[in-house]
Image (cartoon, coloured by chain):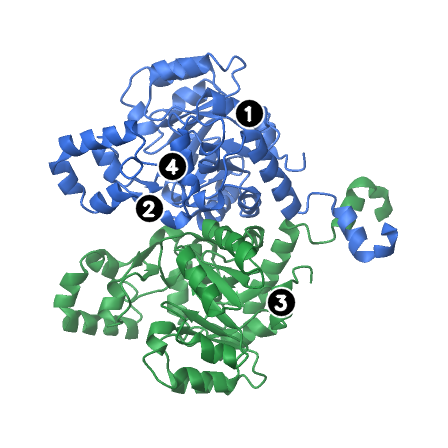
Chain colours: A blue, B green
Amino acid sequence: MLLRNRLTEKFGIDYPIVLAPMDYVSDWRLANAVADAGGLGILGGGYGDSIWLKEQFAHDPNERLGVGFITWSMAQQPGLLDMVIAHRPSNVFLSFSDPAPHAPAVLDAGIPLICQVHNIEQARRAIHVGASVICAQGGEGGGHGMGVRSTFTLVPEIADLLRTTAPEVMLLAAGGIGDGRGLAASLALGADGAVVGTRFATAAEAALRDSAQQRALEASGDHTIRQQAFDVVRRKAWPSQYTGRVLRNAFIDRWHGNESDLSMDLDEQRRAFEEAVEGEDYGLANVIVGEVIGLIDSVNTAASIIAEMVGTASSILGRISPNAVLIDATTPKARS
Amino acid sequence: MLLRNRLTEKFGIDYPIVLAPMDYVSDWRLANAVADAGGLGILGGGYGDSIWLKEQFAHDPNERLGVGFITWSMAQQPGLLDMVIAHRPSNVFLSFSDPAPHAPAVLDAGIPLICQVHNIEQARRAIHVGASVICAQGGEGGGHGMGVRSTFTLVPEIADLLRTTAPEVMLLAAGGIGDGRGLAASLALGADGAVVGTRFATAAEAALRDSAQQRALEASGDHTIRQQAFDVVRRKAWPSQYTGRVLRNAFIDRWHGNESDLSMDLDEQRRAFEEAVEGEDYGLANVIVGEVIGLIDSVNTAASIIAEMVGTASSILGRISPNAVLIDATTPKARS
């Protein structure tokens, strides 16, 4: 209760905790689990798949979930965004490449627009196109991003920018947040809330294979790396400024930095990669997690993850019975 | 007062704020200014310069300052560490390369050893050699580091490691901390205190030219980059895993990624670089700052910097008169 703020009020949620719209992983089960536990659930629309999205919408009768997209990929599919807008999601969350061509349709429909940014220039652009919320993602985050800034400095620098130029725009921190310490730090740095990816990817309700989750749980943050080799082998035409953080494995050791060699042998390597994905061989297949994986050692329900985050953050921020603590400290005899 | 903890107790300071031992920049004036204001002052011994160090010690009659070194460079100068130990600094702060060969001399003298680390493997090593304090530095920091981990995830992951394996070892956060929001976030993430570099490099007492400070104040964190080209032109033989964060400028645009070309033309380029340093031409000369420079827009005294950090962090962490706030909120008439 004590973490309520303008973000929770705007979206009608209990806690300033947002599910990262992880491609396929953030499906209706996970998004509803987060929403049921008081957070903001956002579906991982990813590259864009209308059939998948319609399945998800069938499980969102109250239209409380948002939808996130990899913007440059969504933009290649005419009508996809309109289909989503017609469902009236609680928000549209656009990441990776310019949101300007898509913002008017979202805003004209009265749907809050969340724009993910990775540097100050992109933050200015997001303000310009009318974002309701800016999500500032540091390079420690899992999956795609830019890796040029870190959460610890990007969040307060954008908070300062918003304070002076667009105080009505809210701010989310993303990248590295996996527990109550991270939520408290996000709020301390000036964010209105935190976007949580990796921790929810290792939730019981996540649409991620058990074997991938188990592989992830064994890792330290040291075992992650930003790379592009998996995009090459998957034939995903990412703009060159974006890299993706994944677990290091034999595939990365061989191809990271040697992407042109990989391109020369793409058919063969793609076949091997797809076999590895199918066979759950994570020496070759990708496991997409951020640095924060080093803090995670068990699969938990979304509800228990959120309960820990809220309890710990409230305690750190002195929002649990500050009165009682002071009385304990200053008049110990009152205890008896 | 309310930020006192085991770190402030150990070092006899008022606030858990530590001056980063920035090479030459953290001289006796700056270190004493930080110490006078209640923080922990550490001299920037850097590459190692016994004449400079003796000058500093002459201004530390109460032996309250620490001394930091670039370890691999200090190690090339026999007797330097012994000279420092004989002065009995309040701590020895070792960064960059294995502290093991030097730890016994420091510990045998009963001097607290602070080891700066950039990943989990180095943290385990620091525990093993007997560090009293581990400084976890994320890649957002200015100057040298590894850039493989960020402060936001490295601090809590090492906090967890210490809790389970060496709870007596204290933890400092470094990289990205420039104001009270950052101090609060550091403590929230599990650190016992924060190491502050860039913010103190832009202090009134810092041994940095006014022109360099002014150039820095104009920058956003987006204008910084991790690189090695300045080490090449300065003929500093850094181990290859270390890079340094600086302001981007024309020198970086030309040579970053083209270090082998730079090596081929080193005499000429070195001459031009040295002229630029002398002439305060920061299109070519280096300005060493971290991403947090984007939060800093004025030169302030160390005392005012610390006052802001303490006031803001205390407020964020609910440590300023929570009782009074509560009473204000619930019984407003009591004010009159």
Q: Are marks 1 and 4 on the same chain?
A: yes
Q: Which residue is mark 4?
A: A125
- Pointer 1 chain: A
Q: Are marks 3 and 2 on the same chain?
A: no
Q: Nearer the viewer, residue B228 or B220?
A: B228
Q: Are marks 4 and 2 on the same chain?
A: yes
Q: Which residue is mark 2?
A: A225
Q: Nearer the viewer, residue A88 or A35?
A: A35
- Pointer 3 chain: B
Q: Amino acid at mark 2?
A: Ile
Give the Cα distance between marks 3 and 2.
Answer: 36 Å
**Residue A258 on image: x %, y %:** 18, 45
- Pointer 2 chain: A
**Quick one: label 3, few (<14), some, or many (20+) residues within 10 Å?**
some
Q: Is residue A322 above or below residue A97?
A: below
Give the Cα distance between marks 2 and 1.
Answer: 30 Å
